[in-house]
Amino acid sequence: MKLWATLIAFPLAAIGLGDRPYIDFESLPNKTIWPGPWEKYIKAPKDKTRITPARIWKASGNVTTSGIDAKTRIGHEPGGGIAIGPGGVLTLEFEENIAGRVCFEVEAVDGEPEVNLAYSESSWFADTVPDATTDRLERDLPLAFKFGNGTGRACVDPEFVRGGFKYLTISLPRQWPAAAEGQGRLSRLWDTVDYLGAAGQKILGYSGHDSRRPLSSYLSSTSGSNRAWVSLSDVWVNCTAFPSQTNGRAYSGYFYSSSNLLNRIWYAGAYTLQLSTIDPKEGSALIDLNRVVDGNTSPQGSWYSNFTISNGTAVTTDGAKRDRMVWPGDMYVAIPGIAMSTFDMSAVRNALDVLYAHQYPDGSLPYAGPPMGHRGEFSDTYHMHTLLGTYFYVLYSGDLSWLQDKWPAYLRALNVSISKVDSLGLLHVSSTFDCLRPGMTGHNLEASAILHDLLSKSTILAGWLKNCTSTSPPSWVTLQQTLEAGLARLYCPRTALFSDNVGARSCHGSSHVDPQDGNSWVLISRLNLTPAATPWLDPKSPIRLNTTISPAPSPSLISTALRNRWTKFGAPAPEFPNVISPFASGFELLAHAAAEQIDSAVELMLLEWGYLLDGPGFTNSTLAEGFRIDGHVQYPAYWSAARNSHAHGWSSAPTSVLMQEVLGIKVLGPTGGGDEWEVKPRLSRWLGWARGGFATGRGRWEVKIWRVREVTERTDGRKGVVVVVDAPGQTKGRVVLGDGEGVLYESTVAGGGTRAWVMWYDDGYDMAEEVEELQPGVVVAEEEGEIRKNWYNRDLVYNDGITVLEYDDEFEPLEMQEREAGVVDWEAMEEHFTTPPAPGWDVRNT
């Protein structure tokens, strides 16, 4: 029997949205703004100071545990610890990828043991040797840690914060210093070991242990080198990441949908951004670069995290493990994701401040923050990403005074890029530096399309400041038209995509490449694909010819061509052989959305980011920097597979794309005047329902969407989608409803109340034909408790007071298409400093 609820508008305060109508990013809240069942997906800890391992992942040699099974939870009671002797190796697994200082509670100790600590994000490198942070050695050196002979708490030094790890291996070498040999006594440790043996504990690697014989007789000998031992009653990590948050679970945004995998992806992106936000004094894992500034003499393979990379108390960086630096290339993806999950805008501002502080005399901005910026490091694309990051920071923070202060530097930097557009109508790249992909040179597609988008956003920034300088917005519009004409030179009708440049990587060049990044930026920038009075050009020549190329490009055509290249594990990046790059694929998500192909955007998330979570060797909690086209965890930018960063901010695009393109919530401006926000929801054929929202300094936005069917006198009628919108008071925006075929409804809406609509579909699911606004009061009244988990499965009484709108439980999401795995081009791999794996490796057998 169905529950027929009384349907009324529900006040914000009653649904647990907190006391304040807005968020101050200088003082983030210590509890979530959006309590609900979606909180189970949050990976961040509530108590950052004490994160304990979930289980013993592996143990061998002289290790005594409190149970037979090695994969058991660590005990924390006296006498229930873990004893490690010479030759003992213990690997602990944490529930999530984490970061911070490791601490131990020492229950008993003898012989002044010195253990080796090895950290790894991936299970593939969970061993006595760590994974890698630098590229000088295949793996980092283990961290030597001395326990001495004291009991109680012992923590690694602050400079040895490890920025990302899920596995911690503790090993005690078989040989020990001679100082321990001269003690000539049986310490209290051997008594403890015998006590543990009498209690039924077993020592791994000694299956033949006679319970009547003391364990110490197996472990000790006349050699003092075997007397070193430590018994640990507790191991934990003090997490130093996301320093702006006292409670890591206090999110300012949330996402919840009918897809468990999409929910996991959204929160994995949010958590990745949290782990990548660090204390500025714990930065830079690149000790060789640090040496330029601090003069360190640290040996190859060593590591630490005590280089200051910015001012302030928090800063957003590229990755948790490495490089722990401010890399502007991440900002187009990372800043919106931060704004929609934790709103840690002070960490963003500190990152931008340090880039502007190192601006070169000619106006160029550094390739990355300190330790770079001292030797003229520069990238044309990353230079522009700093300016794009400026736009997103001001958009979400509303910090116009900061923008006013940075505006002269911004214009100098913008003019650096503008000056590189030449007679071909393309930006001529002067630096090969980019995201480590090859071919960044000459008249480049990606750089030119990024500049087109940057000019649009610069015009908006100037409008916010009401500032028309000698470099006025009209001149920027003219330059955009020049770029549109120039980009036409790169279009390849045969592939329905744009080529990388006008040289060897052009349509008819010797090394033709249609890049994923550049073609995605063509759609993101929303450039005019058929510029007025500009004939399409013969791609064989950079010289304009009066010929028309057919068919002309269109957003849907480019989107389809990109989708047709997908492989089993995601979207390949042809500009970077053998690579699947969540960075470039994040831009592709935005490209499909810009082309009104939201089904393709969601499908790619499920395909590629689903593998990033559940594929072999990944963390199931954070998002890796990239991986090989055959599914291997190696990121082919590096010769060592162990160097891949498994918590990299540039991989977090779904966190903002799901919010902006599926729920459709977009902030348009930081202050009043004109439309300040837009809601344009597109549920996609992959979802039956979705909801979510986020808060800024202006207030809170929340959108709920779910599929319904019309029921009258037990007869099923039309099918549709209900959209409910809540927006901050004292704001105004627009609600746009329709589908990929066009807009059916658009209206300016005042914030401060709940509004709801239903979109009716004439063929069930694909094409909307009518939009009706629901009368006031026809909104689900949410209740605390169990019913909230099925918030969408409640009947609405339609406007006529008779018809019922019930959840459409007949809806079936699309099925994932079967695709072949990519094949590695080993010759190309060798060109980029990588080597083949050991014979017999196959992702299907892992």
Image (cartoon, helix red, strand yellow):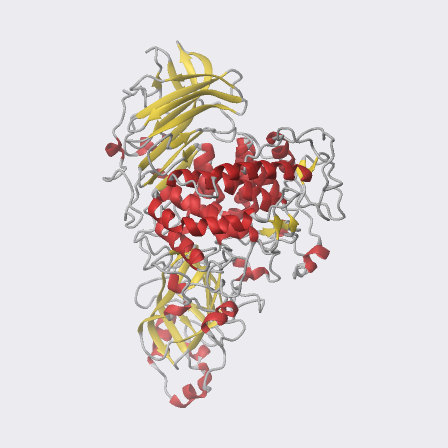
Residue 789 coordinates in the image, percent (x, y): 35, 33
- Residue 158 in percent (x, y) is at 37, 68
Q: Decide if residue 519 is in sight here.
A: yes
Residue drawn at (40%, 51%) of the image: 406
Q: Nearer the viewer, residue 816 or 485?
A: 485
Q: Residue at x 68, y 34 (%)?
A: 496
Observer-nearest residue: 554 or 693?
A: 554
Total numbered labels: 0
Residue 679 in picture, x, y percent from top left: 41, 29
Q: Position of residue 413 (x, y in %)?
A: 49, 51
- What's the residue at 68%, 59% (across, down)? 836
Q: Nearer the viewer, residue 481 or 124?
A: 481
Q: Quadrant of the N terminus?
A: top left
Left or right of 693 in this view: 373: right
The residue sitting at 37% across, 36% down in the picture is 693
Seen from the viewer's position, the closer of residues 162 and 367 is: 367
In the picture as drawn, the residue positioned furthest to the front comes out as 470
Residue 769 to residue 397: above or below = above
Using the rendered image of the protein, determine whether residue 571 is visible from the camera's viewpoint: no
